[in-house]
Amino acid sequence: MLNYALLLHAAPYSHQAALSALRFADTVVANGHRMKTVFFYHDGVHNASALMAPPQDEVHLADGWKRLHREHGTELLVCVAAGLRRGLLDVGEASRHGAMSHSLEAPFELTGVGQLVDAMLTSDRMITFAP
């Protein structure tokens, strides 16, 4: 069994990379491996938005990532710098910045790039999905 980590740079519904990353993650666990971490970086942070509401006939990417966490314990890490630049704030950051509301909820977690480095060091494979 191998431990995998993903680095996702692509925004949801803008590029095939976001859906491909979710499908890859599902395939990893279906084949008996562990999807340890997904790190959302640059425009990929939009995959963690709690405000996402795609049409019913489209894959709900945020729900897919949440399912992966719920069923397999996958860490869903969002780059805090990239997230704040793009308006993705958890409750703590919204309060700290005086924002009226938040747009990121558990199991997604704002974190620094140090967690990305840790994922690289503790995983057998790091796969990048980018536009």
Image: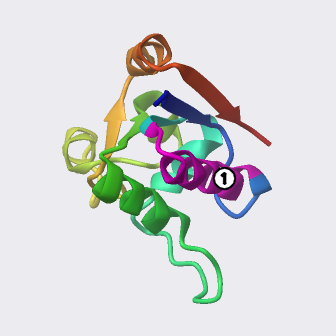
Where is residue 89? Give x, y as percent.
35, 47
Give the side of residue 115 with respect to residue 94, left or right.
right
Count of all numbered marks drawn on residues in the image: 1
Identify whether 84 is placed above or below 24. Answer: above
Q: What element carries label 1?
A: helix
Residue type indicated by callout 1 = Ala
Q: In this view, does 10 lie to the left or right of 1?
A: right
* Mark 1 nearby-residue class (10 Å; few <14, some 14–19, many ≥20): many
Stretch in magenta: 17-34
What residue is shown at x 43% (from left), y 69% (from top)?
A: 51
Find disc 1 in the rendering and name its residue.
18
Q: Where is residue 59 in the image (x, y as percent from the top left)?
A: 60, 74
| Quarter holding residue 105 | bottom left
| Magenta residues, dominant SS class | helix
- Residue 26 in which image quadrant: bottom right
| Quarter of the rendering containing residue 129 | top right
Can residue 10 be seen by looking at this rendering? yes
Residue at 54% from the left image edge and 48% from the top image edge: 31
Q: Residue at (47%, 39%) from the top-left corner?
A: 33
Display colour scheme: rainbow
Q: Nearer the viewer, residue 15 or 125?
A: 125
Up/down of 20 relative to 122, above or below: below
Quadrant of the drawing holding the C terminus: top right
Q: Nearer the viewer, residue 7 or 127?
A: 127
Residue 15 visible within the image: no
Counting from the top left corner in percent of width and height, residue 116 is at 46, 21
Residue 17 location in percent, x, y?
73, 49
